[in-house]
Image (cartoon, rainbow, N blue to C red):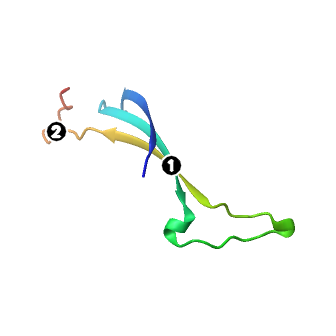
Amino acid sequence: MKLDTTYLGLGTGMMGEPRAACWAVTELPREDFTLTWQKMLTHGIAAIGSTIRVELDIQVVRAAQMDGRPPSAG
């Protein structure tokens, strides 16, 4: 599976912790999950498409040190 990923950059959280953020998106065929049925509306229009769109909004946070000091860079 391929994820189209966008790096959103680095930042600092409310407690001074370093953060990195990215966003990713992919589409999965319903048939991969044995979801092959489609509900048809009047005039033969499909109410459910053949793919599922998955979007991920991700933030990575460096854990604080056990002594309570903010983590050092690197």
Which sits in the foreground, 56 or 10? 56
Amino acid type shown at disc 2? Gln
Residue at 55% x, 60% y: name it.
Answer: 29
Label whose residue precedes the other's in the sequence (1 or 2): 1
Residue at 74% x, 64% y: name it.
Answer: 46
Asked whether, in this view, residue 14 is left or right of residue 37, the answer is left
Residue 19 versus residue 30 in the image, above or below: above
Asked whether, in this view, residue 19 is left or right of residue 28, the answer is left
The label nearer to you, 1 versus 2, is: 1
Which sits in the foreground, 68 or 49? 49
Q: In the picture, residue 60 is in which quadrant?
A: top left
Residue 10 versus residue 64 in the image, above or below: above
Q: Which residue is mark 2?
A: 65
x and y percentages locating residue 63 in the rendered image = 23, 41
Q: Helix, strand or loop at disc 1?
A: strand
Residue 14 versus residue 28 in the image, above or below: above
Amino acid type shown at disc 1? Thr
Q: Are marks 1 and 2 in contact (CB under 8 Å)?
A: no
| Label 2 neighbour load within 10 Å: few <14, some 14-19, many 20+ | few
Q: Which residue is mark 1?
A: 26
Q: Helix, strand or loop at disc 2?
A: loop
**Mark 1–mark 2 distance (CA, rounded to whole Å):** 35 Å
